[in-house]
Amino acid sequence: MAKAKKPSKAKVAKKLTKEELETVKELQAKIQNIVINLGTAELAKNSIVKKHTELNNEWKTVTTDLEKKYGQVNVNLEDGTLTPLESSEAK
């Protein structure tokens, strides 16, 4: 004959206090906000890195074109004057 199961004591659901629940909710919201901000910052970073790469490519194109036209020279960014580079032999 099978043993009869003893009736189990009813499990009482435990609850956090109102203050504990508010603390947990606040912390969860702060963590979610930080995660969102990190994602936004990462997207902004990726955009900036992409723009930097594009500008570097444009810089290389412009400097290559200018070298073909003027040779290897220093450019004065104030007035645009060109001066020849000192050769390594002259040093």
Image (cartoon, grey):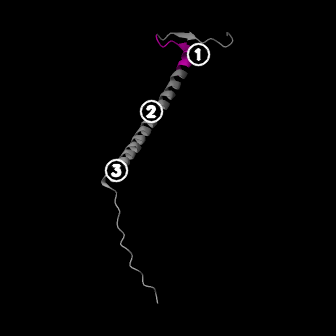
Find residue 48 and report its horizontal and vertical position in percent: 45, 33
Q: Is residue 71 in sight in this rendering?
A: no
Figure check: 39 above or below 8: above
First to last magenta residue range = 65-78
The residue type indicated by label 3 comes to Lys
Residue occupied by mark 2:
48
SS assignment at label 2: helix
Find residue 34 and report its horizontal and vertical position in percent: 40, 42
Label 3 or label 1, whichever lies nearer to me, is 3
Residue occupied by mark 3:
25
Is residue 72 located in the magenta-colored stretch of the structure?
yes
The residue type indicated by label 1 comes to Gln
Q: Quadrant of the C terminus?
A: top right
The residue type indicated by label 2 comes to Ile
SS assignment at label 3: helix
SS assignment at label 1: loop
Residue in the image at 58% along x and 16% along y? 72
Figure check: 41 above or below 27: above
